[in-house]
Image (cartoon, grey):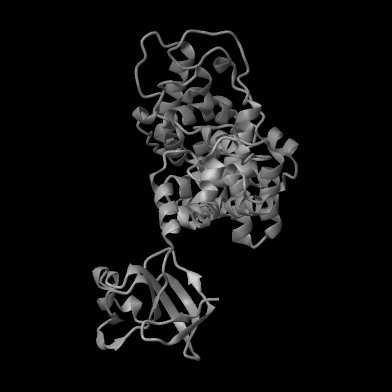
């Protein structure tokens, strides 16, 4: 093994590389390094050139006061501690092989999806599955952060947090932001006073969506009655509706119109299924499917919006695919977040179990990885690939990806062989 030495000839032994820092400050915290037999504990900074230390103004930044080693590819100058030009920082030159730089450049420039597809088939299944498992947890942890932030804006109320999270996912992507805005405008404490009256629940729900504020030419009796009821409730509870212009209808199938989704949520609330405690005691897929089994009130069985013509009668239930998406994007993240909050690992395990029981999502991300040889067995896998695509592939964060690492470390001949037709 090649002996490591500082630029002034001292032997370097890395005892512990420390913790990789992804935020501002030194690249590695709490590293342990022996320099000529003396143990140093502190931070490590990594640059391509030594002069980057000055170019990034680390020489005047107290956050870099505890750096014990500066690792560079090219030592083009000496570096000193912040505000102490007489005390030099040890530097270690680590040469990057040309083929590694070439491979990284290819990854950065490639327009293939995924860019590392040439190496995927050669990877051990254990390594692939290990990376997917790590990405599954990473995605749930990220969503936990989002949910906890949402909880803060919901007065730390888990029922309200559940309602806002579920409503956002009822937007199924295109109306997600609008549904979250709507859910925050719905005062559940006021709605609870009218829980036994579906008509009044719909009046508040549609009114707060801004869908009862306009005069509709040719409006029917149901719309007129809802509008009048909302005027009364609006005054009673001092309600302020959202801007209806936030709703998007372009290229939406009628089944996905906000009116239908709001009607479904109103029925779920009326049937007392929008209850966080019910989510916590669910143990099977069947329990969750039952939780989201709903229909719409009589009016909506023959309408898709207030000013639309009547249509053939249908209950407009949530499809199995829609229920799966709600479990994936609402139930699993909320269970995981609540488990973390309460220190109940069994809830975190339950969240993962639900994802592993569900079929994988069908989208362009999953298909592109399947073409490269990474196939999904469950929703847990498809969630991992979504995390991989959004947090590593899209921002070209290949150096932090295990697949990217494998691509970079292989010789060009190996990659060309994999790229060539058989």
Q: Is residue 333 above or below residue 326?
A: below
Q: Name the one closer to the observer, 319 or 413.
A: 413
Nearer to me, 141 or 97: 97
In the picture, measured across the screen, residue 283 lies left or right of residue 383, that is right
Q: Looking at the picture, how far across and down is residue 89, in whole percent?
A: 34, 83
- Above or below 46: residue 130: above
The residue shown at (45%, 41%) is 184
One can see residue 217 in this view: yes
Q: Is residue 361 above or below residue 63?
A: above
Q: Residue at x 34, y 17 (%)?
A: 215
Residue 219 position, x and y percent, is 41, 11
Depth check: give the residue in front, 120 or 340.
120
Toward which corner of the image does residue 87 lie, by quadrant? bottom left
Q: Nearer the viewer, residue 218 or 152?
A: 152
Query: Dividing the image into 4 quarters, which one contains the N terminus?
Result: bottom right
Counting from the top left corner in percent of width and height, residue 63 is at 34, 76
**Image quadrant where residue 213 sits:** top left
25 displayed left or right of 169 = left
Q: Report how many numbered discs are placed on residues in the image.
A: 0
Q: Position of residue 401 (x, y in %)?
A: 51, 54
Q: Residue at x 63, y 61 (%)?
A: 342
* Viewer can see residue 274: no
Give the quadrant of the C terminus: top right
């Amino acid at each position: 093994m090649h002996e490591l030495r500082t630029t002034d000839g001292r032997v370097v032994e890395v005892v512990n590389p420390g913790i990789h820092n992804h935020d501002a400050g030194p690249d590695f915290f709490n590293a342990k390094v022996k320099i000529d037999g003396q143990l140093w504990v502190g931070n490590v900074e990594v640059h391509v050139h030594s002069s980057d230390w000055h170019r990034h103004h680390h020489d005047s930044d107290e956050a870099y006061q505890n750096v014990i080693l500066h690792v560079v590819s090219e030592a083009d100058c000496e570096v000193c501690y912040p505000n102490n030009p007489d005390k030099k920082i040890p530097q270690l030159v680590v040469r990057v092989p040309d083929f590694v730089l070439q491979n990284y450049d290819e990854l950065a420039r490639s327009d293939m999806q995924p860019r590392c597809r040439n190496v995927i088939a050669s990877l051990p299944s254990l390594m692939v599955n290990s990376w997917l498992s790590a990405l599954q947890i990473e995605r749930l942890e990220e969503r936990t952060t989002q949910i906890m932030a949402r909880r803060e804006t919901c007065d730390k109320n888990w029922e309200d947090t559940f309602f806002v999270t579920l409503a956002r996912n009822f937007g199924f992507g295109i109306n997600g932001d609008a549904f979250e805005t709507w859910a925050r405008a719905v005062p559940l404490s006021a709605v609870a006073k009218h829980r036994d009256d579906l008509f009044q629940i719909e009046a508040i729900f549609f009114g707060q969506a801004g869908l009862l504020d306009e005069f509709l030419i040719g409006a029917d009796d149901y719309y007129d009655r809802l509008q009048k009821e909302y005027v009364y409730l609006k005054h009673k509870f001092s309600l302020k509706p959202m801007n209806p212009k936030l709703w998007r209808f372009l290229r939406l199938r009628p089944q996905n119109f906000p009116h239908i989704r709001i009607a479904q949520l109103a029925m779920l609330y009326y049937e007392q299924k929008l209850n966080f405690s019910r989510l916590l005691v669910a143990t099977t897929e069947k329990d969750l499917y039952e939780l989201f089994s709903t229909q719409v009130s009589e009016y909506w069985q023959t309408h898709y919006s207030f000013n639309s013509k009547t249509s053939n009668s249908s209950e407009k239930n949530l499809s199995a695919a829609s229920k799966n998406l709600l479990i994936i994007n609402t139930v699993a993240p909320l269970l995981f977040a609540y488990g973390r909050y309460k220190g109940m690992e069994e809830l975190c395990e339950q969240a993962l179990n639900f994802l592993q029981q569900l079929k994988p999502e069908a989208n362009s991300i999953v298909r592109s990885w399947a073409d490269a040889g990474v196939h999904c067995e469950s929703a847990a896998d498809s969630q991992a690939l979504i995390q991989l695509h959004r947090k590593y592939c899209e921002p070209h964060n290949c150096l932090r990806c295990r697949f990217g690492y494998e691509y970079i470390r292989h010789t060009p001949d190996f990659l060309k062989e994999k790229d060539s037709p058989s």
